[in-house]
Image (cartoon, rainbow, N blue to C red):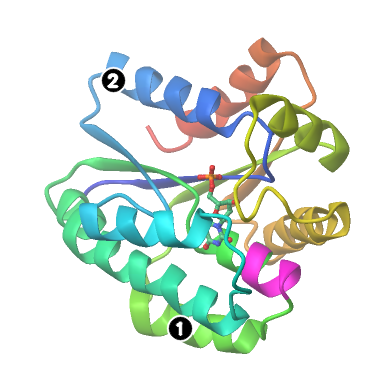
């Protein structure tokens, strides 16, 4: 792989979109060839799966069905967008990736981490991000921000305890992959958050 693969993670309301846009502009200004994408989604087919996954509905969604659809979307995204871009030498900036599956489907829903690791191995065949930035913020603050935005999707309408498990999972995963996963304190003023992000990006440049 010639390009670098950067993922950005965090519980809802941590400021992911703002900071993904900031990273994209930062890399563009340094004339790095970069594409910005997201999960679930990133291709027309995977975006359809995203809509299915996020839409609130009356029918309870089976946890295993949700997990498999996350990886179905990821397989499509990886093979048609991410890997070709990395092979062309482009940088790929992805809003969420498999750490989110461990956090939401694993810690949040209670699906087996071994099952998730097996699906990860099948779909990714060893590919891991070069850098994962975990934006960390008190869950209550993040959820207050999300609730102000309006209509909640199927994930955003989960209970506080769900998001507390998600946050803890991100923190645990960072301890397990310290070579690629780094925490940024998202409760700081935005300039300081972005200063910390720049320091992490400079390790790759
Ligand atoms: P977002 O892109 O606005 O953060 O919304 C995506 C939602 O999908 C978010 O609530 C987290 C959830 N999600 C999972 O549950 N598992 C995953 O593997 C991914 C990528 C996202």
In this figure, which residue is indicated by the disc labeled 1?
Answer: 119
The answer to whether mark 1 is within 8 Å of ligand 1 is no
Which residue is nearer to you in this view: 45 or 52? Answer: 52
Residue farthest along the front direction in this orientation:
58
Picture residue at 70% right of the left edge, 33% below the top:
146
Look at the numbered disc 2 and give the secondary structure of its residue.
helix
Q: Is residue 190 magenta?
A: no
Disc 2 versus disc 1: distance between alpha carbons? 33 Å
**Percent from the top left, x then y, of residue 32?**
25, 27
The image quarter containing residue 63 is bottom right
Q: Nearer the viewer, mark 2 or mark 1?
A: 1
Q: Is residue 37 left or right of residue 83?
A: right
Which residue is nearer to you in this view: 165 or 46? Answer: 46
Query: Up-down: is 170 above or below 183?
Result: below
* Numbered range of the magenta stretch: 104-109
Query: Mark number for residue 28?
Result: 2
Q: Is residue 130 left or right of residue 195?
A: left
Query: Up-down: is 149 above or below 142?
Result: above
Which residue is nearer to you in this view: 199 or 19? Answer: 19
Note whether residue 40 is visible. Answer: no
């Amino acid at each position: 792989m010639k390009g670098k693969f950067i993922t950005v993670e965090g519980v809802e309301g941590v400021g992911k979109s703002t900071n993904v846009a900031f990273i994209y502009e930062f890399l563009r200004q340094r004339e790095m060839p970069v594409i910005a994408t997201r999960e679930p989604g990133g291709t027309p087919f995977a975006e359809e799966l995203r809509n299915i996954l996020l839409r609130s509905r009356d029918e309870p969604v089976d946890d295993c069905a949700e997990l498999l659809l996350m990886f179905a979307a990821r397989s499509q995204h990886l093979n048609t967008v991410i890997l070709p871009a990395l092979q062309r030498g482009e940088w790929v900036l992805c809003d969420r990736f498999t750490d989110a599956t461990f956090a939401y489907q694993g810690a949040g829903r209670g699906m087996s981490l071994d099952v998730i690791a097996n699906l990860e191995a099948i779909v990714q065949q060893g590919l891991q991000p070069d850098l994962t930035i975990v934006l960390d913020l008190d869950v209550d603050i993040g959820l207050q921000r999300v609730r102000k935005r309006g209509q909640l999707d199927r994930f955003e309408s989960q209970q506080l305890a769900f998001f507390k498990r998600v946050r803890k999972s991100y923190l645990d995963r960072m301890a397990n992959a310290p070579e690629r996963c780094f925490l940024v304190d998202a409760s700081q003023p935005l300039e300081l958050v972005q200063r910390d992000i720049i320091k992490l990006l400079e390790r790759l440049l």
